[in-house]
Structures are given as structure tokens and as C-alpha cells.
Amino acid sequence: MPESKRRTKNPQAAAERAARSAESPNPVWYKPVMFGLMLLGLVWVMVYYISQTLFPIPNIGGWNIVIGFGIAMIGFFMTTNWK
């Protein structure tokens, strides 16, 4: 029975595949924006409570909490892509 030929490994092809599969790092601005959004959301909610609902936007009432948590959640969602 004839034997099948052995495959030879191509080191150049393996290097190309490794380079393609390697993910590029995040841009320099990514981490400051991520932490900045989390802090901005926290400060937004804190200002709302400390000012007794007069600030940051007085006419929308409790929606200030939603806005603050929304800003913070954007920052937290950014952490899923942080490398």
C-alpha cells in the first residue's frame, strides 16, 4: 500500500496567520475616555443628589439619574473592548 506524502510546515505562512490573528491594541485615547465617562456619570448623579435636584438640569427631575447612569454605563461597556 502506498504511503501518503508528509506535509511540510511553512514557517512564513504560520507567521502570517499569527500576525493576522493578533489583535491591535486600543488607541491612546481609549482608556482616558473610558474612565472619564465612568467618573462623569458618577459626578452627574452625585451633583444631582447633593444639590437637592437643582443641578445639573433642573427641569427634567429624576431623568438626571438616568442620564448619569447612562453616561457611566457607556464607560463600563467600553471596558469589554479594553486590551
Image (cartoon, rainbow, N blue to C red):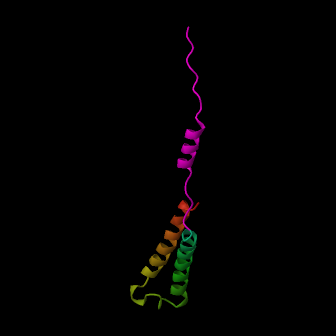
Where the C terminus falls, by quadrant? bottom right
Q: Nearer the viewer, residue 54 or 56?
A: 56
Q: Is residue 24 magenta?
A: yes
Image check: 58 left or right of 52? Answer: left
Please name the residue shown 59% across and 28% down the image.
8
Give the residue furthest to the top. 1
Residue 32 sits above or below residue 23 on the image: below
Q: Nearer the viewer, residue 49 or 31?
A: 31
Give the residue furthest to the left. 59
Please name the residue shown 54% across and 69% down the image.
30
Among the 4 quarters of the image, the one containing residue 80: bottom right
Among the 4 quarters of the image, the one containing residue 50: bottom right
Q: Nearer the viewer, residue 51 or 1?
A: 1
Q: Nearer the viewer, residue 78 or 21?
A: 21
Q: Which residues are magenta?
A: 1-27
Please name the residue shown 55% across and 83% down the image.
46
Where the N terminus falls, by quadrant? top right
Q: Position of residue 76 (x, y in %)?
A: 54, 67
Residue 20 sits above or below residue 66 on the image: above
Residue 58 sits above or below residue 3 on the image: below
Q: Position of residue 38 (x, y in %)?
A: 55, 74
Q: Is residue 60 magenta?
A: no
Q: Position of residue 26 (x, y in %)?
A: 55, 63
Please name the residue shown 49% across and 69% down the image.
74
Q: What is the count of numbered marks?
A: 0
Q: Position of residue 13 (x, y in %)?
A: 55, 39
